[in-house]
Amino acid sequence: RPEITEDTPECYANLMNSCWDHDPKKRPSMKVIRNTFGSWAFRGKNKAEFDQAEAKRKKLIELKIGHEFAEKYHSEAIYTSRLLSDIISKYFLLYTLDSNYISAELELDIDTESLSSQNLSIKTQELNLETDDDNVGKRIKTR
């Protein structure tokens, strides 16, 4: 049986202990367990007790993860952990830079607006040529 830690809500610990009773007849039925969990999750029963236990659990975790924990390495470890926040912030900075891309190698500016307008005028000319042959009175509008 798992150990009931000090950050476990008392109502939850009581339910666990009742499930472990030596006499199976004294153990709660599945319906009782379901209703108990439902009252905690959906009706907010014992909410303050769960909130207090969660705060205690977080504090215990913070105490365990300190400078001592981060600086101790196993003698046979080949990999080390590091925080991702620095990596994420660098990626975010690169991702959010201005969208006027410049090729560093060739030192060329890429003007996507003029490329798309040139492409559009070529397509417009092609459409006008196709329509002039078959239907002289009809024109195709393009944007």
Image (spheres, rainbow, N blue to C red):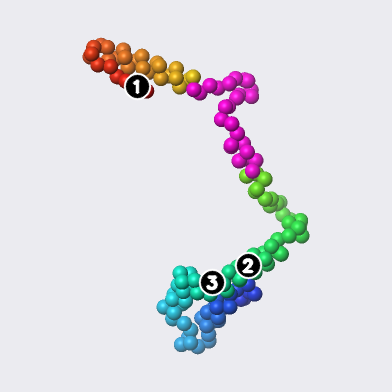
Q: Residue at x 40, y 16 (%)?
A: 121
Work out whether residue 108 can be spotted: yes
Q: Which amino acid type corresponds to the residue marked 3 in the rendered image?
A: Lys
Q: Is residue 44 part of the magenta span, yes or no?
A: no
Q: Which amino acid type corresponds to the residue marked 2 in the rendered image?
A: Ala
Count the marks: how many? 3
Q: Is residue 32 above or below residue 140?
A: below
Where residue 53 appears, as percent x and y from the top left, is 61, 71
Q: Which amino acid type corresponds to the residue marked 1 in the rendered image?
A: Thr
Instruction: State the residue in front, 137 or 82.
Output: 137
Position of 124 with respect to 21 (left or right) is left
Tell me the number on the disc at residue 142. 1
For label 3, the SS is: helix
Q: Which residue is mark 2?
A: 55
Q: Residue at x 44, y 17 (%)?
A: 118
Highlighted range, magenta: 89-113
